[in-house]
Image (tube, grey):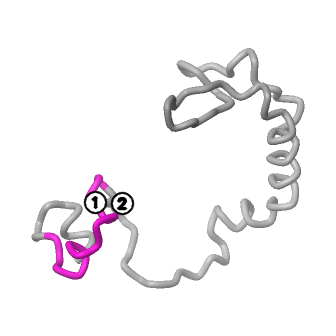
Amino acid sequence: EYVAANREDAPLPKKLRKNPQYEVIGGYFPGLTTEPFHDTSGRPWSALADAFPSIKRELEALLARDQEFKDVGKPLGWRTMPVFYKGAQHPDFPAEDCP
């Protein structure tokens, strides 16, 4: 149902229309099956899961530098530290903290 609604092949199911936070925003992924759970063995993202401890350390190092984040979402208070800008690494990004 979700895939069909996102592909605009079918109307949005009633159970999704009741949820005010649900919005169809082009969430269709060609080739992705509708299985509720996927076997992750042998998939490329298993390496990502294995790298979690390193990724967490890198994130914590960046969060410790929060004073360097740029305001981007006034008045909502969103802040960011850009990694790439226009296809190139941002010169202010502390790449040494994220090998």
The N terminus, quarter of image: bottom left
Of callouts 1 and 2, which one flags the residue occurring earlier in the amino acid sequence? Answer: 1
Crowding around mark 2 (Cα neighbors within 10 Å: few <14, some 14 to 19, many 20+) is few
Residue where numbered disc 2 is placed = 29
Q: Which residue is drawn at 70% across and 68% down?
A: 46
Q: In the rendered view, does 11 fall on the left or right side of 82?
A: left
Q: What stretch is highlighted in magenta?
A: 12-26
Cβ atoms under marks 1 and 2 closer than 8 Å? no
Amino acid type, callout 1 = Glu
Mark 1–mark 2 distance (CA, rounded to whole Å): 16 Å
14, above or below 3, in the image: below
Residue 2, horizontal then vertical, whole percent: 27, 72
Q: In the rendered view, does 54 fall on the left or right side of 92?
A: right
Where disc 2 sits, the SS reads: loop
- Main SS category, magenta section: loop
Q: Residue at x 74, y 66 (%)?
A: 49
Residue where numbered disc 1 is placed = 23
Q: Residue at x 82, y 55 (%)?
A: 56
Amino acid type, callout 2 = Phe
Residue 20, horizontal then vertical, whole percent: 28, 66
Residue 16, horizontal then vertical, whole percent: 25, 75
Marks counted in the figure total: 2
Magenta region includes residue 58 = no
Q: Residue 77 occupies which quadrant of the picture? A: top right
